[in-house]
Amino acid sequence: MNDAPWKTRKVVIVGAGAVGSTFAYALGQSGLADEIALLDPNRDLAMGQVLDLAHGQAFFPAVQIRVAETSDYADAQLIVITAGSKQRPDESRLDLLQRNIKIIDGIIDEIVRQKSSAVVLMASNPVDILTYAASKRAGWPRGRIIGSGTVLDSARFRYLLSRHCGVDVHNVHAYILGEHGDSEFASWSMTNIAGQPIQQFCSLCHTCDDAEAARSRIADEVIHSAYHIIEFKGATSFGIGLALTSIAAAILRNQHGVLTVSTVLEGEFGIEGVSLGVPCIVSQNGVERVLPVTLPPDELRSLVNSATILKQGIAQLELDAASVAEVSKP
Ligand SMILES: NC(=O)c1ccc[n+]([C@@H]2O[C@H](COP(=O)([O-])OP(=O)(O)OC[C@H]3O[C@@H](n4cnc5c(N)ncnc54)[C@H](O)[C@@H]3O)[C@@H](O)[C@H]2O)c1
């Protein structure tokens, strides 16, 4: 008989808005968690979401769904942060930074105060800068605080390629790398359809007149997807809810899956001092390691460009923090 104590797979979701509640719904359906706890300063919203979700329990795999307290951080396996403002139409993710950084600082301080040993997964935007700031603030090993990065963007890319090429999305392997934002880019060197590199696939497949133009149109559509959805319905939620569930699966099942989460680079690709989406092995420890891949010079330049843009955001944060400290000096 195995006498090892039963360890509940407990997930705390911080922020019970569109993203937090959609993720809770997808996570509940997935059967990955034993306990899902929702935390939001708007207690009525958290309670409403919990009751609504809990009433579907007869149709879910067994899971306990309830409103969380900050003390729930202590024994959670995974804490997913979806708290804060979202983009308004015509606003970039970087514009959100000033509004969301204070919220994230407060949440991270409380997680550390509760001596949590969870992996923290950031979804709030701008996700790369907030992941970097949270990682520095907590002072934990880099892999334990990760961002959703370009996991959703890569899924959008696979979907658009699959539709264009007429091949099941599950047979399309493709990654968007860099900033989760305007400077992200398609890694065509890592794109393959059923094992065939995309260039080779295109040279044998004659379903479109101009494959190069089609590739460029698809990459552009991925980058602008969120803007279109926000224009139509005010927020994105289903795609990110599912993307967070796939990252949660890699963590809760210790899957060692390859996902383009956002992680702090420490010299990989010649980049450091910034967090951004690159292929990583994700396990119960968060990012186990950055997957070593050789990018061609144009893709490497695009990755460095994303890093430079994100570093400007980080520098702005550091500048703001320094001026706040100066003003509050006695
Ligand atoms: N990473 C991605 O791919 C991705 C995709 C979509 C949205 N997002 C981001 O996710 C975030 C949330 O978006 P949304 O549509 O759910 O917004 P929303 O306004 O619907 O929900 C945000 C929730 O956060 C709560 N909140 C505020 N301060 C909090 C705190 N200190 N602790 C806990 N909760 C707090 C609010 O009360 C609100 O309920 C935004 O920053 C958005 O840009 C990221």
Image (cartoon, rainbow, N blue to C red):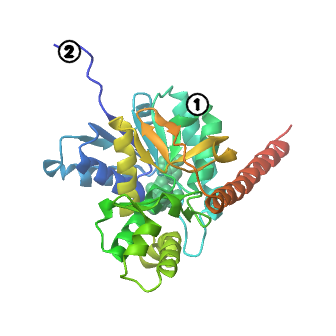
Which residue has dot 1 on it? Answer: 140
Query: Residue sitting at 34 percent across and 57 percent down?
Result: 22
SS state under label 2: loop
15 versus 87 height, above or below: above
Amino acid, disc 2? Asn
Q: How far across and how far down the image is residue 55, in percent?
A: 19, 52
Mark closest to the chain's N terminus, 1 or 2? 2
Which residue has dot 2 on it? Answer: 2
> Answer yes or no: do the residues labelled 1 and 2 have beta carbons within 8 Å?
no
86 versus 142 height, above or below: below
Q: How far across and how far down the image is residue 37, in percent?
A: 35, 41
Specify few, some or many for label 2: CA neighbours under 10 Å numbering under 14, 14-19, or 20 or more.
Answer: few
Most foreground residue, 251 or 122: 251
Q: Quadrant of residue 235?
A: bottom left
As drawn, is 300 to the left or to the right of 164? right
Q: How far across and how far down the image is residue 125, in percent?
A: 55, 57
Most foreground residue, 211 or 184: 211
Most foreground residue, 252 or 171: 171
Amino acid, disc 1? Trp
Query: Residue sitting at 49 percent across and 51 percent down?
Result: 260
Residue 271 in sight? no
In the rendered view of the protein, which quadrant contains the C terminus?
Answer: top right
